[in-house]
Image (cartoon, grey):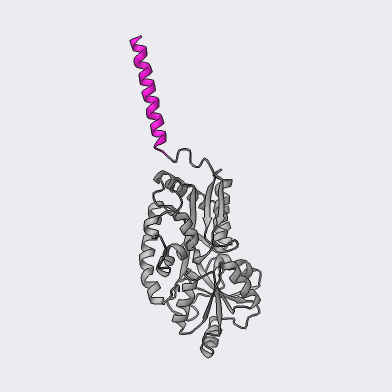
Amino acid sequence: MFRQILISTAVIASTGLSFSAAAQDPAKDYPNKPVRMIVPFPPGGGTDILSRVIASKLTEVSKWSVVPDNRAGAGGTIGITEAVKSAPTGYDMVMGQKDNVVLGPYLYKSLPWNPTRDLTPVAHVAYTPIVIATAANSPYKTLADVVAAAKKNPSKITYGSPGNGTSIHLAGVMLEKAAGIQLTHVPYKGSNPAMMDALSGNVDLLVSSVPSAIGQIKAGKMRAIAVTSAARSTSLPETPTLAESGLKGFNVSTWYGIFMPRNTPTPIVNKVNAEVNKLLAMPEVKEAILTQGAEPKAMSVQAFEQFFQTDFKANKAIVEASGASIQ
């Protein structure tokens, strides 16, 4: 009898330890309900396209339920604010990018968050150069055409971007400074509205991520003049870089990555990172991202954290030197 009691006690204790261990592993049954992926820009833009590729593949391949939620405005910072104020449970993630988590805090001085303090980098997804484009019937066929016209009529040439404070807006400012010209910036609430106005001729130039513009470029409705990266885009191999077009040393690109609120449990962060990296290694996902004009690139949680911290610190001086600011 005494032996039976000891055995029963041991079983209960062992079971209790098992339950306790399970309770301490929040990733064990994660996710057991839908996960929201906040998209800080409107439908149709580069961030939205990449977000939906990852969300759909997490749903299809990983058997998770990931639901995109577009929260646009203020250069993408409204969507980031929505993520920051969410509970750190792993059920709210955001597709951040250089625009809103690196440049935004230096441009929007009243933001109620600091990205290095309030966000956890989870998974790097892709990077992309920025493209300078015009409507196919535009008189501007090369960067030299734009520079010559802008010098003849300062501020007359307009360019549309997805919003104040985005890396794309900043690229336009840096282009002006590097070429010694004055353009007029027309900000929109996302890449798609800017694209529509560029196609209709309401703005002379479109400054855009490659993913947002490549469809219209490939369809022949828009003409790519140059890309801003040091090397040519894999998706637009015939389009010269700004450096090749006369602006030596010009090199600007943007990147996309998944973030969660700070203090999200590390096991969940690691689990999401592993699943996203697994997707990025799949040929069909690589092809889907490359087709959109971006370059897929996986990183560990630690590598992405270091990359993010370094980029955030480095861009303070770049933003200040550009003179870009949000009124």
Q: Which residues are magenta?
A: 1-25
Please state the horizontal and vertical placement of residue 182, each as a whole percent of the image.
Answer: 49, 84
Q: Nearer the viewer, residue 242 or 21?
A: 21
Q: Is residue 123 visible?
A: no
Farthest bottom residue in view:
152
Please state the horizontal and vertical placement of residue 259, each as a whole percent of the image.
Answer: 45, 54
- Residue at image point 36% right, 16% down: 7
Q: Is residue 262 magenta?
A: no
Q: Nearer the viewer, residue 235 or 156?
A: 156
Q: Is residue 167 toward the left or the right of residue 3 in the image?
A: right
Please state the horizontal and vertical placement of residue 75, each as a whole percent of the image.
Answer: 50, 66
- Residue at image point 66% right, 69% down: 219
- Residue at image point 57% right, 64% down: 45
Q: Is residue 21 magenta?
A: yes
With respect to residue 123, does 225 lie above or below? Answer: below
- Picture quadrant where residue 201 is located: bottom right
Q: Nearer the viewer, residue 298 or 133?
A: 133
Please state the horizontal and vertical placement of residue 311, each as a whole percent of the image.
Answer: 39, 64
Quarter in which the C terminus is drawn: bottom left
With respect to residue 65, does 6 lie above or below? Answer: above
- Picture quadrant where residue 13 is located: top left
Farthest top residue in view:
1
